[in-house]
DNA sequence: CTTTGATATCAAGCTAACTTCAGGTTGCGC
DNA sequence: GCGCAACCTGAAGTTAGCTTGATATCAAAG
């Protein structure tokens, strides 16, 4: 509501803890948008602080930026997101966490069996069967339990 | 115990599901070792199948190769690891899983609070405070909830 | 002995998610 | 109205974890 609802990139950086360069990178990726001043400097909405906060939380969950982009698509473009918008998107994140916990729990159970038998054998061990093997594909760093 | 306790890289590749190039890379990184034939070809121990199986499981947990290298250091060099060796190292992995589950559970609880208040505010939200913020540092892909 | 498939090395390329650098412009406080 | 911090762009560098390509040698079947 104040006229300085528009903040420069340095302020956004300080408020989010993100590097200025990272924010510019996110803008290139389409995770945030900005308008420009007469002198070609970026001005962001105050609500982008929250937006980038969400990005960081989602990243900690191991989501890639493109996943996050998809999540953020649920937020209104142009308009400042309200509480309902954020609740909706937060719930989506919660589901993500839940499934990760489930997966880890299953993995732990399997590992327990393997500690029991001491096997870790690729042929017999529940932890490492053909299904699991198929999941590893493509280049780049492997992310958690995809 | 058979004389062909020594296997070529292609066999190791087939038994582990890893690409030949990946195995060579792992050898460079010191995760496995091999001896050479007269014609300069690698020969691995049969037990390296297990060793690389462990590597893959640990990777699924989000561990980096250097972390895994540290874990594997607990295994005997030269001698084929026995059941006790594997049990020990598996337990270490189990602890890792446990702490990840705990961290995720804590994160979920915090997120629940935030859904309740709809805030996701960086200043007030439990999910995103100064402690958490400090944890993001360095280049490269960010790994899960470090 | 030849052929074919498995191996070997070394360098370069790739993706993600950024950072760093070089060189130039803006804008606000005094 | 000046000076300096903050901002701009574009290209290149970084780390992890591999893959791909080029070129050459090995080994086992026929």
Image: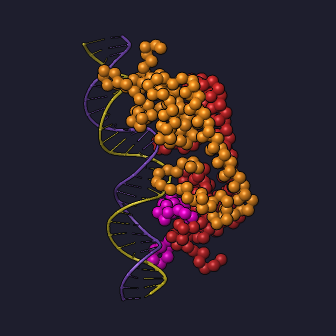
Chain colours: A orange, B red, C purple, D yellow
In the rendered image, the vertical position of residue B32 relative to residue A25, given as above or below:
below
Q: Nearer the viewer, residue B37 or B55?
A: B55
Provide residue C18's location: percent of width, then percent of height: 44, 38
| Residue drawn at point x = 52 percent, y = 36 percent | A71
Provide residue D24's location: percent of width, then percent of height: 35, 73
Side of B33 where A100 appears, left or right? right
Provide residue B113's location: percent of width, then percent of height: 65, 28
| Residue drawn at point x = 66 percent, y = 52 percent | A107
In the rendered image, the vertical position of residue B42 relative to residue B60, given as above or below:
below
Provide residue C24's location: percent of width, then percent of height: 25, 29
| Residue drawn at point x = 67 percent, y = 62 percent | A125
Q: Which residues lie in the magenta part?
A: B16-43
Q: Nearer the viewer, residue D1 or B145?
A: B145
Residue A25 visible from this viewpoint = no
Q: Nearer the viewer, residue A107 or B51?
A: A107
Residue B139 colored in magenta in the image? no
| Residue drawn at point x = 56 percent, y = 28 percent | A86
Residue at the right extreme, as displayed: A116
Residue B18 visible from this viewpoint = yes
């Amino acid at each position: 509501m104040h006229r300085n609802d528009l903040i420069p990139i340095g302020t956004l950086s300080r408020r989010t803890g993100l590097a200025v360069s990272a924010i510019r990178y996110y803008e290139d990726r389409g995770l945030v948008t900005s308008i420009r001043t007469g002198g070609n400097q970026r001005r962001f909405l105050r609500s982008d602080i929250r937006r980038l906060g969400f990005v960081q939380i989602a990243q900690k969950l191991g989501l890639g930026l493109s996943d996050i982009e998809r999540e953020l698509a649920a937020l209104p473009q142009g308009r400042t997101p309200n509480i309902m918008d954020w609740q909706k998107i937060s719930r989506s994140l919660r589901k993500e966490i839940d499934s990760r916990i489930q997966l880890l729990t299953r993995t732990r159970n399997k590992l327990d069996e393997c500690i029991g038998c001491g096997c870790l054998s690729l042929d017999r061990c529940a932890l490492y069967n053909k299904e699991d093997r198929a999941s590893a594909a493509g280049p780049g760093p492997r992310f958690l339990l995809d």
